Amino acid sequence: MAYPLAAGMPNYSGTFIPTIWAGKLLEKFYDASVVPQISNTDYEGLISAQGDTVNIRTVPNVTIRNYSAGQPLQVERPDSPMVTLNIDQGRYFNLVLDDVMEIQSDINLMNTWSSDASEQLKINIDTYVLANVAVDVAAVNKGATAGRLSANLNLGATGAAVQLTKANIIDKLLEMGQVLDEQNVPETGRWVVMPAWAIRLLKSSDIKDASLTGDGASPLRNGRVGMIDRFTLYSSNLLPRYVDTNNPFDIIAGHKVGLTFATQITKTETLRSESTFGTLMRGLQVFGMKVVKGDSLVRLYAYA
């Protein structure tokens, strides 16, 4: 908007008064990407294009039987079922930079746009993955009667989400830890992803006896906040929110072995546009996700 003019005053802006273009772009802030931090990415090097399938071998359950002297031994052939990870999701961007814009700009727009596209891909993929985790969490690791052994931990259910406050949020986190303990999930490598409002409640709660430690440096772009109990704590604004009583969120926790994720940028190219005087830049990223051990994950269905 040009400087305000009095009535009847001619507008010389852009004619005799020059228009100035800034040499820097306005800073942009992005949601943090957490999926690579909370998932198993061991199979990422096996994919090359959308539609690939990765067959993952599982460890069989070996039966232990009683033995009495002289009895015949029963032979068992352990069954090791396959878990299939389908690389069935693709996301792309396709940008054009007109030659006229490139000449007039003193900023490398193509590099700036490609950086933005990379961040937007992370956000889009994180949103998809986080929205599809809860459905495959083991039934005994979520709901109003969670706990494989205790079955008395209320982690919220449809129509009856748990209200989190600074008075109870630590207890709920410890209950999520108990659920994983009852599933014999290793203590090392556990994580929990929470929305920003839950992080605020946690920071304002009485955390003296909950083993909460902050990082010495500023959080990285993966949303890492610190540790509580045995969980590495991540903050994300991409967790799903539901159209339900009090509009609750998913808060998920677990171990990396529970979630498998694989992604690859399979195409990045620049070429001349056929329909305009300009340069096209486009990229394709393919990925797949699967909950491979639902008993290694836990879901808290909660609202503020």
Image (cartoon, rainbow, N blue to C red):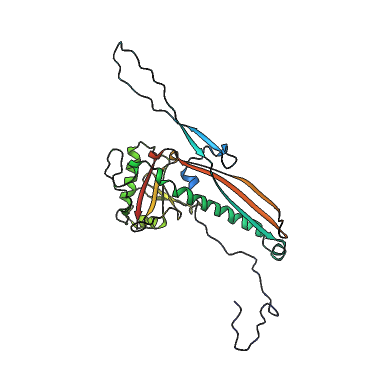
Q: Can you see residue 31?
A: yes
Q: Does residue 24 sit above or below 134 in this rendering?
A: below
Q: Residue furthest bottom?
A: 8
Q: Please determine whether, in this image, residue 48 is positioned above or below residue 15.
A: above
Q: Residue at x 49, y 33 (%)?
A: 56
- Would you place residue 258 above or below residue 68 in this image? below
Q: Is residue 246 above or below residue 58?
A: below
Q: Could you say which is closer to the camera, residue 32 or residue 123?
A: 123
Q: Position of residue 286 (x, y in %)?
A: 56, 45
The residue lying at 46 percent from left, 44 percent from top is: 38
Q: Position of residue 217 (x, y in %)?
A: 48, 52
Locate residue 25 relative to residue 223 in the image: left or right.
right
* Any part of residue 208 in sight: no
Q: Quadrant of residue 247?
A: bottom left
Quarter holding the N terminus is: bottom right
Please tell me which residue is depicted at 31% across the width and 12% down the height of the picture.
Answer: 71
Of residues 136 and 258, the one nearer the viewer is: 136
Q: Quadrant of the C terminus?
A: bottom left
